[in-house]
Amino acid sequence: MLLQNARWPDLKDLANRIFVVPLGSLEQHGHHLPVFTDSIIIGYVADRVERLRTEKIVMLPVQWLGHSPHHRRFGSVSLDLMPYVEMICGMCRSLIGMGARKIFLMNGHGGNDIPCKAAQRELKSEFEEMRDLYIVYAAYWNLAAARFTEIRTSPAGGMGHACEMETSILLAQNPGLVDVSKAKRGGPGPHMGYRVNDMLHPAPFHMINEFDELSHNGVIGMPEEASAEKGTQFLEAAAQGVVALLDEMGGWTFQEKGPAIP
């Protein structure tokens, strides 16, 4: 169900469900996609997931404000690191206060990764005696990585930002938002060693860069490989990847039971 449609006396009866928090952003997406792309796409994923598991989850509205300082030179509306960490903590504290014991932070923007994981650590320490509390974080593209690999036609370096996948989903769902004539590849290409940047092929090291240090046009990847047909497949794969995790989370009790004795 959708949390925004609930009435407060109903909240106590929802405590045994998984509460899903979709996380987006408002930032540049090259010359061909709108700045709201991440929030639009995570909204599509959330809608599909909610329809598939409406009796088992509580879906929150999309949180559009993301952590996007690396896009500021091109254009973004961003919350800084520590305020974003505290925002995630505050949202989770509110859900815990409503009785939630399983929370899934469903991410749709790569820049949210570090602050969300930091928030998880803070919350684990704060609620360390609450053994039945599970706060899980994942980006939809990681949950759907195997299927995304089957769908894509671009090589490593082709899917990163305003790329084949994101452009395809918008072509499938709202083609009027895509200016195909301006869809040009950008960012480190597939033959640049450790500098290849791809959402499904993470580098073995971590480095902080501003986006204009990586891309001349705000794109990382190959949006010219996009199609509406692929977009339908990518979106369904994302939803199914999320649902598979939620189904497993629904049966988790391992924290309460503790580790098995060999």
Image: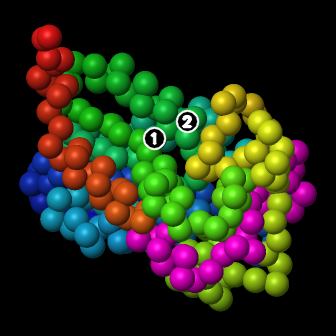
How many labels were placed on the picture? 2
| Relative depth, front residue between 132 and 203 | 203
| Residue 152 spot, x, y in % from top left | 59, 66
Q: Is residue 200 visible?
A: yes
Q: Is residue 98 magenta?
A: no
Q: Residue at x 83, y 44 (%)?
A: 192
Quarter of the image for the C terminus: give it.
Answer: top left
- Marks 1/2: CA–CA distance: 8 Å
188 above or below 256? below
3 above or below 172? above
Quarter of the image for the N terminus: give it.
Answer: bottom left
Q: Residue at x 22, y 46 (%)?
A: 248
Residue 164 falls in image quadrant? bottom right
* Amino acid type, mark 1: Ile
For the magenta stretch, what is the residue range?
A: 212-236
31 above or below 248? below
Drawn side of residue 156 relative to residue 123, left or right: right
Where does label 1 land, which residue? 88
Q: Residue at x 28, y 19 (%)?
A: 128
**Is the C-beta separation of discs 1 and 2 under 8 Å?**
yes
Q: Which of the numbered marks, if any, corresponds to residue 115?
A: 2
| Residue 133 spot, x, y in % from top left | 23, 32
Q: Residue at x 14, y 25 (%)?
A: 256
Drawn side of residue 139 relative to residue 201, left or right: left
| Residue 127 spot, x, y in % from top left | 29, 24
Mark 2 falls on what kind of element? helix
| Relative depth, front residue between 64 and 139 | 139
